[in-house]
């Protein structure tokens, strides 16, 4: 799963962590976030987020 970063405040959304404070359970891909989900730091909408490239790691996802 791809991590996304907020262009406004640099908050990073981690799919494996989710956003429990906003009711998003861990393991939720960014694409599956509700359209009204907002950046927990600055309130930016999903369109303000860009994918973050992860270098050198192609495994590990899925471990608890
Ligand atoms: Zn933000």
Image (cartoon, grey):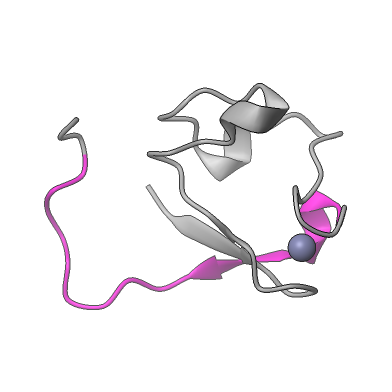
Any magenta on residue 45? yes
Q: In the picture provided, is 44 more to the left or to the right than 57? A: right
Relative side of 58 to 36, left or right: left
Q: Judge left or right: residue 27 versus residue 5.
A: left
Residue 15 coordinates in the image, percent (x, y): 45, 42
Q: To which quarter of the image does residue 53 belong?
A: bottom left
Nearest the viewer among 21 and 63 is 21
Q: Quadrant of ligand 1?
A: bottom right
The image shows residue 56, relative to residue 42, as above or below, that is below
Please report the residue visible at 46 percent of the width from the left and 49 percent of the height from the top: 14
Q: Quadrant of residue 11?
A: bottom right
Q: Report x, y in % for residue 39.
A: 76, 51
| Residue drawn at (51%, 36%) of the image | 18
User: x and y percent of residue 7 in the render?
Assistant: 73, 75
Q: Which residues are magenta?
A: 44-61
**Residue beneath the point at 43% across and 54% down:** 2
């Amino acid at each position: 799963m791809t991590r996304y970063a907020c262009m406004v405040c640099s908050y990073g959304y981690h799919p494996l962590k989710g956003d429990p404070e906003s009711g998003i359970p861990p393991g939720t891909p960014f694409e599956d976030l509700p359209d009204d989900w907002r950046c927990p730091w600055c309130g930016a909408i999903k369109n303000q987020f860009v994918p973050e490239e992860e270098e050198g790691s192609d495994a590990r996802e899925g471990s608890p």
